Image (cartoon, grey):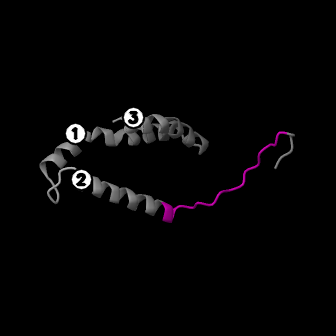
Amino acid sequence: YLLVGILQGLSGPLINVYPLDLGATEAQQTTLSSIRSLPASFKLVFGFTSDNFPIWGYRRKSYMLIGWGMAAFSMSALIMTSDLTLSEEEYEKDDGTIA
């Protein structure tokens, strides 16, 4: 719980500021924060499922491995299908010139 709390606490400001930088509306930001908190709502369901339906004789390890595999696959799919090129934006230097 400590690690989850730390990660949610540290990611909160980024989740709130980054969509504004992309021009998201308030409705889109509300949707994003609702989706972000959705997995916490299913903690009890996941706990009961893993306790009552063990896979390969393990109650938690097998579900953790499946979750890690799904996360790795999702991250790989995001990396492969995303445009990772950075565009150069104009910014003002300290001496007032635009780079």
How many marks overall? 3
Neighbour tally class for label 1: few under 14, some 14-19, many 20 plus, Cα within 10 Å: few
Q: Which residue is mark 2?
A: 61
Element at label 2: helix
The Cα atoms of the two marked residues, 3 and 1, are separated by: 17 Å
Label placed on residue 44: 1
Examine the residues drawn in magenta and state their main secondary structure: loop
**Which amino acid type is shown beneath numbered disc 1?**
Leu
| Quarter of the image that includes the N terminus | top left
Tell which of 62 and 89 is nearer to you: 62
Q: Position of residue 63 (x, y in %)?
A: 24, 53
Q: Is residue 71 magenta?
A: no
**Which amino acid type is shown beneath numbered disc 3?**
Gly
| Horizontal side, residue 88 vs residue 30: left or right | right
Q: Of label 1 and label 2, which has the lower sequence position?
A: 1
Q: Of label 3 and label 1, which has the lower sequence position?
A: 3
Q: Nearer the viewer, mark 2 or mark 3?
A: 2
Q: Position of residue 86 (x, y in %)?
A: 65, 57
Neighbour tally class for label 3: few under 14, some 14-19, many 20 plus, Cα within 10 Å: few
Look at the image and give the residue range highlighted in magenta.
79-94
**Which amino acid type is shown beneath numbered disc 2?**
Lys
Q: Is residue 93 magenta?
A: yes
Q: Which residue is mark 3?
A: 5
Tell which of 5 and 12 is nearer to you: 5
Q: Residue at x 87, y 40 (%)?
A: 95
Q: Residue at x 49, y 36 (%)?
A: 10
Q: In the figure, 63 relative to 3: above or below? A: below
